[in-house]
Amino acid sequence: MSRVWDDQNKFQRWLDVEIAACEAWAELGVIPPEAAALIRKNASFELEKIYEYIEITHHDVTAFLQSVAESLGEEGRYVHFGLTSSDVWDTATGLQLRDACDLLLIEVDRLTRVLEQKATQYRDTLCVGRTHGVHAEPTTFGLKIAVWVDEMRRNRFRLEQAREAVAVGAISGTVGTHASVPPKLEEIVCRNLGLGLEAASTQVIQRDRHAQFVTTLALIGSSLEKFATEIRALQKTEVREAEEPFAAGQTGSSAMPHKRNPEKCERITGLSRVLRGYAATSLENVALWHERDISHSSTERIILPDACLILDYALSMFSDIMENLVVHPDNMRANLERSFGLVFSQRVLLALIETGLSRQDAYKLVQKNAMKAWETHTQFFDLLMADPDVMSRLREDDLRTLFDYSFYTQNIGATFDRLGL
């Protein structure tokens, strides 16, 4: 990913566009084919020279063209023929974004495979489900991860759409009228570079495309933050149901040798915030003055490379975390039972309703015993057994049947079937 965005590759992509334009001019009979061939063979640039010329010209493209001209003879006069800076820059950026997307898709696929494997591995591993951070009803650890699998598959689809949006070129000249470069040349260049075509441009490719790309990266980052936040919560000392890997020799605190902190998940959480900030900037870039200004340029030099690098790094890191995740099924079971059997309250509620009791009266009856279980640390089942209003409607055997964890996992297989897991 770093190579995609370093200056050497950026200027090489500029040169790729310039060469493609020269060859298109030759195909259209405007410049001699032998000149285009010499440009293809000999055109090059020197980074240090470009940096030197930028100090003089204060313009990246003219500095680049000056360096390229030094590698050519008379045929050099055809380089940048009829083009404007944005023709080169934006089209080359389309190539870089396409290549970056391809690398990100590889990482998305890797993480999705890891999640699929872990979801299957822990499909039947019972744990408590929490809403508002409070015990709700039982679920399985595999189902938690299966939800992430589905989300990452959606993220892949979004990234494919974003790739299609940004992998485009535009060779339309100043203000986009094609006055100095015919539409046919633009079509040839984009075809030969493997890019889509910006059907209507001004002097720049329209920035809603780039905003779609960066916001997609931010959304994927938000998914990673969601997953990482769950692991962080499960790694709390009093919970300790799952932990990110902790390597031999690793330290968690300079002062407290016992610490095993979820610092990798915290890192992902922080980086996702940066991505969302970049997404906001990309949206601000959509509205440029008239046919163009360059207020977007200064920001894109930061947000496009950085967003790609950040997400690439975060995806890779979270794949590593999930591959080596430490899972504690015994703690999951112990935590499930810490709420004194209150996770069965809905089953008791429904059973009482089925006996003919109104929902309101049944709710009050169950809640009364549930609150007592919380306050006295008494098993919910025992309190129900001691309540004559409950036992006048339910037999002991019926009540025991309600306190069965397998009831909550009986349909989890359907979700896995839907996901093809």
Image (cartoon, rainbow, N blue to C red):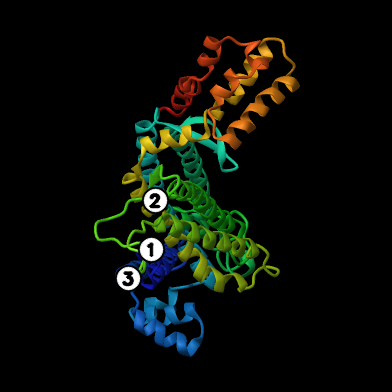
Depth check, mark 3 against mark 1: the one in front is 1
Q: 395 or 172, which lies in front?
A: 395
Residue projecting furthest to the bottom: 56
Q: CA distance from mark 3 to mark 2?
A: 48 Å
Q: Is residue 335 above or below residue 93?
A: above
Q: Residue at x 31, y 54 (%)?
A: 246
Mark 2 lies on a secondary structure that is helix
The image quadrant of residue 368 is top right
Q: Residues within 10 Å of mark 3 (few under 14, many from 20)?
A: some
Q: Amino acid at mark 1?
A: Val
Q: Which residue is mark 1?
A: 4
On screen, 87 above or below 312? below
Q: CA distance from mark 1 to mark 2?
A: 22 Å
Q: Which residue is mark 3?
A: 38
SS label for mark 1: helix
Q: Quadrant of the N terminus?
A: bottom left
Q: In what element is the residue under mark 3? A: helix
Please state the horizontal and vertical placement of residue 66, each as a whole percent of the image.
42, 82
Whichever of callouts 3 and 2 sits on the residue coming sooner in the sequence is 3
Residue 323 on image: x %, y %: 32, 45
Q: Which of the two residues, 27 or 261, is positioned nearer the viewer here?
A: 261
